[in-house]
Each structure stands twice: as structure tokens, then as C-alpha cells.
Image: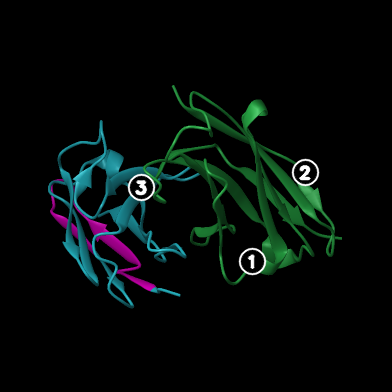
Chain colours: A green, B cyan
Amino acid sequence: QITLKESGPTLVKPTQTLTLTCTFSGFSLSTSGVGVGWIRQPPGKALEWLALIYWNDDKRYSPSLKSRLTITKDTSKNQVVLTMTNMDPVDTATYYCAHSQLYEAIFDYWGQGTLVTVSS
Amino acid sequence: DIQMTQSPSSLSASVGDRVTITCQASQDISNYLNWYQQKPGKAPKLLIYDASNLETGVPSRFSGSGSGTDFTFTISSLQPEDIATYYCQQYDNPYTFGQGTKLEIK
């Protein structure tokens, strides 16, 4: 049974760096084809893909946010970490991590999401 | 980047109705398209992948079709539990979502 859970601060100040951790179970990020991605959703708005890391350490980023994002994995801990620098109030959103397989961005299992508010 | 134009943005239909949502890509994405259902306060759920493949456990009243730039998502007979927002997502890197279709019961 695949599960994912996001963790991190619920409130960050403008200009700070956000660090989110996705802790998962039921699969290994050393298995060929497997990936973990991050997607966010501002309140009342649409989904936005942020980043994706695959088992072979292939990393993909949203072009519009690439300069602010870093995604890493710790296979031994079953965790994926996303950092986003220079946070702004417009980055207020629910942040989701999700599992993908077959080396494609088909997100078949999602975490419950974590709401991050950016405010001074 | 590939833009996804999803329509309509909202839709009101009666139980038992056939419901159709469309998604148009700004360039050819072959069949690299998924459809998700999101209920209020919940994470999205994958319904359709590769444009037309039904995810395991998803009711057969949901279907998808299309290739290239034009895609369609259909609910053959709307049920009360289908009230949600639906999103298309293309996965020809970089990945993008449509703006969503909020489905309500008439």
C-alpha cells in the first residue's frame, strides 16, 4: 500500500526559504521508473506542477520556478525534499507530493497536502 | 511551455446526464494526457492516464479520448458522488495542468 505524507512549516515569512519533506512508504525510490513529484494549489485555484525526481536522480523543474527550486531524495529514509527560496505571499498554497511510475509524470498516489502560508 | 486550455470552467448537470469536458494542448502531446478528480479539501485522484486508459478501480462511467492536441473526458451517467473539480494534465515535460472544471449538480 503506497502512502505519502508532506511535512514542513505552516507559516513562513517573505524572503525566507521553504523546506518541505515528503515521507513515503510502500515503494522504493531506487526502483526503476519510479518518481516523486511536487504539485501545489493556491486557495481556490488550479494545480501547478513544481518538480519531479526519478529513481535515477533525473530531476525536472517547472521552468517558471526553476531558479528557486531544488528537489533531492534520500532513498534510505524514503524521503524527498523540496526547497523553495525567496518565498512570497503568492506562494501561499497547499503543497502536495505524489508518486509516479513508468518514468512518466502520471501521478497515481498523492499525499494529503500541507498548507503553507507566506506572511510577515 | 505547453499550455492546456480546459473547458468549460464550470458545469451544471443533472444526475444521469452525460457530461463532457475538453482539454486542448497548445502543441502536439501525442497521448501524454491524464485526468484527475478533486473533491473539496482532498488531494486529486487519477482517473484516466495516457488519454484513454482507466486507472484501476475507477468506475467505467468515466472515459477519455483524443490524441495530438484535442482531448475529451466523459462521464456517461452523472452520479451525485461525481461532484468535484476535474483537471487535465499533460506530461510532455515540462508538465502542466488545465485550469479545472467545477462540476455541480443541477
**What secondary structure is the magenta-colored segment mainly?**
strand
Q: Are marks 3 and 1 on the same chain?
A: no
Q: Chain of mark 2?
A: A
Residue at the (66%, 46%) spot, across then down: A72
Q: Say what amino acid the circle numbered 1 marks.
A: Lys
Residue A110 to residue B103: above or below: above
Q: Residue at label 3?
A: B37
Q: What kind of element bears circle 3?
A: strand
Estimate the spatial distance between the alpha carbons at disc 2 and disc 1, rounded to whole Å.
21 Å
Give the numbered dot on residue A9. Answer: 2
Estimate the spatial distance between the alpha carbons at disc 3 and disc 2, rounded to whole Å.
27 Å
Residue at the (75%, 47%) spot, across then down: A19
Residue at the (53%, 44%) spot, across then down: A56
Image location (x, y in percent) of residue A95: 61, 49
Q: How many marks?
A: 3
Residue A22 to residue B99: above or below: above
Quarter the C terminus of chain B occupies: bottom left
Image location (x, y in percent) of residue B16: 13, 46
Q: Say what amino acid the circle numbered 3 marks.
A: Gln
Examine the rendering and report whether any part of residue A39 can be seen: no
Residue B93 to residue A28: above or below: below
Q: Does the CB distance between marks 3 and 1 fall below 8 Å?
A: no
Q: Residue at label 1?
A: A66
Is A84 or A73 nearer to us in this picture? A73
Crowding around mark 3 (Cα neighbors within 10 Å: few <14, some 14 to 19, many 20+) is many
Residue A77 falls in which quadrant of the image? top right
Write down the region rendered in magenta. B4-21
Q: Say what amino acid the circle numbered 2 marks.
A: Pro
Determine if the magenta segment contains residue A103.
Answer: no
Q: Chain of mark 1?
A: A
Q: Chain of mark 3?
A: B
